[in-house]
């Protein structure tokens, strides 16, 4: 399988390798113990592997799928040594990710056919939502795109202030109103402003409350409906930001938000400070929503476009 013989951007890959160090170290410490003194992948090794994957926050359903894939390989090849297990895992997990992350972007880009391209960002407070928006604005601007931000999380003054800080840092325009304003009104004004400024990309921040699924659904639906008065097919992407360091809690957040609105892509943040990097594999597989971006550091350049081959290569390097 030649999928890992790609030439990755060395600087980006080094950042990714470093960001996944804790996840990789935790996983391989457990795996080494599981196969110590064993030469063949047998039922005992697979049982241990199943436990390792679950405790690495890959998730039960995804773990079962991975184990079934390996069992099929064992049945077909008759004898698989434990020294081959690492490569088999790489191949099967990359295959699993390929089912969801098809035709993935290799760079920060938006379709030229959609102008302005409207990105609505959702996620609970504290997951790195506003920081992700700021870093996205930076990357898009570096590509020569004109970006406008909309501060539609009007329930917290801190959210508006934080987005203003990022707008100033990246030097892009922001549309905002007072705390307590109607989020849909802010979104409407942002889209009108973006159209008037001939913007390429409009990024709308939304409230991160998850107290009530019905209220959340109604609020996000209203924001969408009002945006469509300006741009009929907006938003073009609904990006759910999840904190990778929360492991299984990120699964629950994904469940809640995908039930409340139509999420079309994912960003998984804070992978550099955790041993729970396996959550990316499970979330991508279970929700059948492509992971578009991953956060592997605090620097402004440390938000990366997710590449399944690079991710698996770094995880199993």
Image (tube, helix red, strand yellow):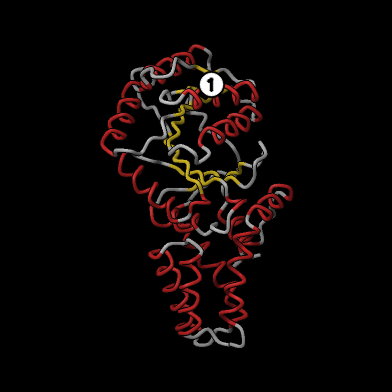
Q: Residues within 10 Å of mark 1 (few under 14, many from 20)?
A: many
Q: Give the quarter of the figure containing the C terminus.
A: bottom right
Element carrying mark 1 = strand
- Image point 48% across, 17% down: which residue? 176
Residue visible at 31% across and 24% down in the picture: 225
78 sits to left or right of 264: right
Q: Nearer the viewer, residue 182 or 204?
A: 182
Q: Quadrant of residue 142?
A: top right
Q: Residue at x 47, y 45 (%)?
A: 242
Above/below status of 60 relative to 250: below
User: Closest to the observer: 59 or 42?
Assistant: 59
Q: Position of residue 64 (x, y in %)?
A: 40, 70
Residue 290, given in percent of the width and then of the height, sits at: 46, 48
Who is closer to the viewer here, 219 or 191? Answer: 219
Q: Residue at x 60, y 20 (%)?
A: 172
Image quarter where the N terminus lies is: bottom right
Q: Position of residue 169 (x, y in %)?
A: 65, 24
For residue 138, which quarter of the picture?
top right
What percent of the width, then of the height, locates residue 282? 45, 58
For residue 253, above or below residue 138: below
Q: Which residue is mark 1?
A: 148
User: In the depicted view, which residue is nearer to us: 3 or 94?
Assistant: 94
Q: Residue furthest left?
A: 214
Given the current orientation, which residue lies at the most extreme top position? 196
Q: How many labels were placed on the picture?
A: 1
């Amino acid at each position: 399988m030649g999928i890992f013989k790609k030439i990755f951007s060395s600087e980006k890959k080094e950042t990714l390798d470093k960001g996944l160090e804790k996840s990789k170290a935790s996983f391989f410490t457990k795996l080494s113990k599981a196969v110590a003194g064993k030469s063949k992948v047998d039922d005992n090794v697979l049982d241990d592997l199943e436990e390792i994957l679950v405790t690495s926050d890959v998730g039960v359903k995804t773990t079962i799928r991975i184990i079934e894939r390996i069992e099929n390989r064992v049945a077909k090849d008759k004898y698989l040594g434990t020294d081959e297990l690492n490569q088999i895992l790489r191949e099967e997990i990359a295959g699993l990710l390929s089912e969801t992350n098809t035709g993935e972007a290799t760079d920060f880009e938006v379709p030229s056919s959609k102008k302005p391209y409207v990105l609505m960002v959702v996620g609970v407070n504290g997951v790195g939502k506003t920081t992700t928006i700021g870093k996205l604005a930076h990357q898009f601007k570096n590509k020569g795109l004109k970006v406008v931000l909309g501060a539609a999380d009007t329930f917290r003054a801190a959210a508006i202030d934080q987005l203003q800080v990022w707008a100033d840092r990246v030097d892009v325009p922001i549309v905002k109103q007072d705390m307590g304003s109607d989020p849909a009104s802010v979104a409407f004004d942002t889209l009108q402003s973006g159209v008037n400024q001939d913007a390429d990309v409009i990024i709308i921040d939304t409230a991160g409350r998850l107290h009530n699924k019905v209220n959340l659904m109604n609020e996000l639906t209203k924001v969408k409906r009002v945006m469509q008065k300006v741009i009929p097919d907006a938003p073009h992407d609904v990006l759910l930001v999840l904190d990778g360091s929360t492991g299984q809690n990120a699964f629950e957040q994904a469940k809640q938000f995908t039930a409340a609105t139509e999420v079309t892509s994912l960003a998984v943040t804070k992978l550099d400070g955790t041993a729970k990097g396996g959550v990316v594999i499970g979330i991508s597989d279970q929700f059948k929503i492509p992971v578009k971006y991953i956060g592997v550091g605090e620097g402004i350049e440390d938000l990366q476009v997710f590449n399944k081959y690079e991710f698996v290569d770094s995880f199993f390097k």
